[in-house]
Amino acid sequence: MSSSNYDLDDLKRRMQGALQVLKQELGGLRTGRASTGLLDHLQVEVYGTHMPLNQVASISVPEPRLLTVQVWDKAALHAVEKAIVAANIGLTPNTEGQVIRLRVPELNQERRKELVKVAHKFAESARVAVRHVRRDGMETLKKMEKDGKVGRDDHGRMSDDVQKATDQSIADIDQALASKEKEIMTV
């Protein structure tokens, strides 16, 4: 196997990256209690670029069901509100001066189902990312076979390895989703 541009470990690492992003996003789906983790993944469009929320504001939890976002630059206030609404995490910004208050709603059955839908969207995004990595790996293998760098047998074996890594990553994603879904529905 003389492969200079095929690296199964790199493909697995990229697939694991999709799983880590999913876990981070699912961690942001808090169940009924205020947590700064709810806003960790938020990107705000300010100063002509996308920045993490924690680079334009400080986030705190003054009460168990309340988050406050202290925006440092008044010019960024509207952009922060817009990012919170666009994140679709079920929090409505209530702005007083440069402080945005976010009441975390009681988790009723309807809200739980909403959170599960959001979790499913996150999981689907992760699956798509894994499939993109798989496609990249398969295209690299096809090109290598075409260029005579690997034989048909090696190509088949290597393709199977990529597929096994893909299947394992998808199974890990499904497991993370099932775990979060159970947590949301039973809290």
Image (cartoon, helix red, strand yellow):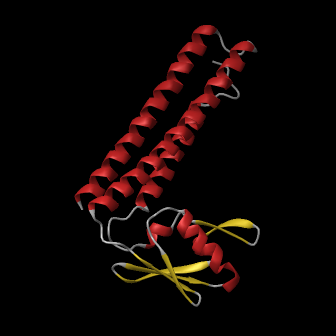
The structure residue drawn at horizontal position 41% and vertical position 60%, both measured from the top left corner, is 27
| Residue 94 percent location from the top left of the image | 50, 81
Q: Quadrant of residue 129?
A: top right
**Is 11 rendered above or below residue 69?**
above
Horizontally, residue 119 falls left or right of residue 130, namely left
Residue 108: tell me if it is visible: yes
| Residue 20 percent location from the top left of the image | 48, 50
Q: Quadrant of residue 150?
A: top right
**Is 161 rendered above or below residue 171?**
above
The structure residue drawn at horizontal position 63% and vertical position 80%, both measured from the top left corner, is 77
**Is 60 rendered above or below residue 13?**
below
Horizontally, residue 48 falls left or right of residue 170, namely right
The structure residue drawn at horizontal position 30% and vertical position 57%, both measured from the top left corner, is 184
| Residue 136 percent location from the top left of the image | 64, 31
Depth check: 108 or 130 in front? Answer: 108
Residue 16: tell me if it is visible: no
Depth check: 28 or 169 in front? Answer: 28
The structure residue drawn at horizontal position 44% and vertical position 30%, both measured from the top left corner, is 167
The quarter of the picture where the C terminus appears is: bottom left
